[in-house]
Image (cartoon, grey):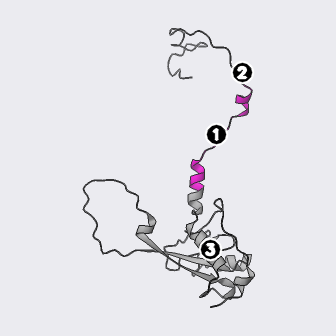
Amino acid sequence: MVCDHVSQVVLTLPLSSTPVYKEECTQCFDDHNMAAGIDVCLSCFNGGCPGTPNNHAHQHAMKSGHHLTVNIRRVRKESDERPTKLTKLEIVEEPENEQYEFETFVRCWGCSGARLDIVPEDVQRVVQAVLHAVEASKGSEIKAWAEEVTACSHFEGLTQAPAADFSSKALDQCSMCDKRDNLWM
């Protein structure tokens, strides 16, 4: 199907800091393993379920005016290989692309959710960027682990007394009380 909405929309590629919700619906948390997959808005990268009963992707399109989405559905690859015999217990991360295939297509909610047969090159670039983007939940995980250390205001005004000559006897007890254990500071 050829769609008039494709020529009317201006799409931008997601930045590395842009959250892309491509694994689950942001409203009901249906995920891309479901039969209908997940529709990712190509304008704001919101993820929505395209199927009934909720149809959050359609609701988002009607509310925001963002008609173009890419449907992403993850399907487990069929394998004729027998699993290797376990000889030791270990945790090994298997890359997702070895276990799953991703089926995608572009749809227009302005045309009643019709699947587009002809997709312009600029839309294809945005679709590829969405597929290669870091999932929003993983991005927030990464951000949580990337701690930025900053000095507090108390530290900035701290003046340290000149070093004193400490004998080992003076270090076995707190200088201000009788405490003798956990003197790690």
Tag 2's secondary structure?
loop
Give the mark nearer the N terminus: 1 vs 2. 1
Label 1 crowd bin: few (<14), some (14–19), many (20+), radius 10 Å = few
Residue 121 picture quarter: bottom right
Q: CA distance from mark 3 to mark 1?
A: 37 Å
Q: In the image, is 52 to the left or to the right of 154? A: left
Where residue 53 appears, x then y in whole percent? Answer: 58, 81
Would residue 40 be seen by someone viewing this image from the given angle? Answer: no
Q: Are marks 3 and 1 in contact (CB under 8 Å)?
A: no
66 above or below 111? above
Q: CA distance from mark 1 to mark 2?
A: 20 Å
80 above or below 167? below
Q: Which residues are magenta?
A: 140-159
- Label 1 belongs to which residue? 149
- Label 3 belongs to which residue? 125
Q: Is residue 145 magenta?
A: yes
Instruction: Nearest to the eye among marks 3 and 1: give it.
Output: 3
Q: Amino acid at mark 2?
A: Thr
Q: Amino acid at mark 3?
A: Arg
Q: Amino acid at mark 1?
A: Val
Closer to the camera, 159 or 183? 159
